[in-house]
Amino acid sequence: MLEEAVTTLRSNELNTELPISDSWSPQISVGVGVLIPDSYVKDLSVRLGLYRRLSRLNSLDEIEEMKNELTDRFGNFPDEVNNLLEIVAIKFLCRLASIEKLDAGPKGLTLSFRNNSYSNPAGLIEYINLNAHSVYLRADHK
């Protein structure tokens, strides 16, 4: 069922009405379960509809509205749904910052910028310098 939902989401991403340059989606890997379990939303078609709607959210306000709607319709959501909503928010923020890929794990995280460029490199270097105890560039520039 999850594979069907992912396939549905991917096909919807390709059919958006956004210009091609705006239709990219960041790759997020954080190692947590992100799904709407059938124990939370029993009807498959409703779950797939929710996945479609989640893929189209375009602001943090819309994500917050979706959280409220899910709680109103189905009750308090399980951790997997909370993780899913947080990933949707992270994807939105990554698009704003032109972060194409984010990998997080127990040792930290790595970011890759879209087209290997960042709109404010001086600000990024300043941020890295101010946070040298916890942020650094790897030898491969990630």
Image (cartoon, rainbow, N blue to C red):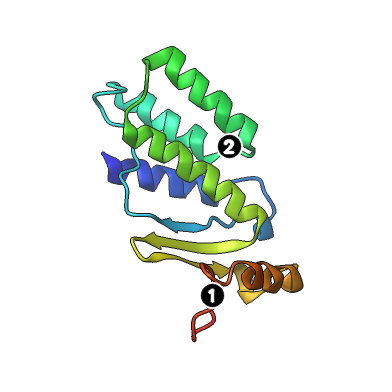
> How far is the residue under mark 1 from the one under mark 2?
32 Å
Q: Amino acid at mark 2?
A: Leu
Residue 106, percent from left and from top:
33, 61
| Secondary element at tag 2 | loop
Position of 82 relative to 111 (above/below) = above
**Residue 112 found in image quarter:** bottom right
Q: Quadrant of residue 124?
A: bottom right
**Residue found farthest to the front:** 133
* Residue positioned 53% across, 70% down in the render: 133
Q: Is residue 15 visible?
A: no
Of 75 and 20, nearer the camera is: 75
Q: Is residue 31 left or right of residue 67?
A: left
Q: Residue at x 37, y 16 (%)?
A: 74
Q: Where does the image place residue 31, in percent across and percent down from the top left?
A: 32, 54
Q: Quadrant of residue 71?
A: top left
The image position of residue 7, as x and y in percent, is 37, 47
Observer able to see residue 56: yes
Residue 124 versus residue 43: which sits nearer the camera? 124
Residue drawn at (31%, 42%) of the image: 4
- Kind of residue at disc 1: Tyr
Q: Which residue is mark 1?
A: 136
Residue tagged by mark 2?
57
Q: Is residue 17 above or below residue 82?
A: below
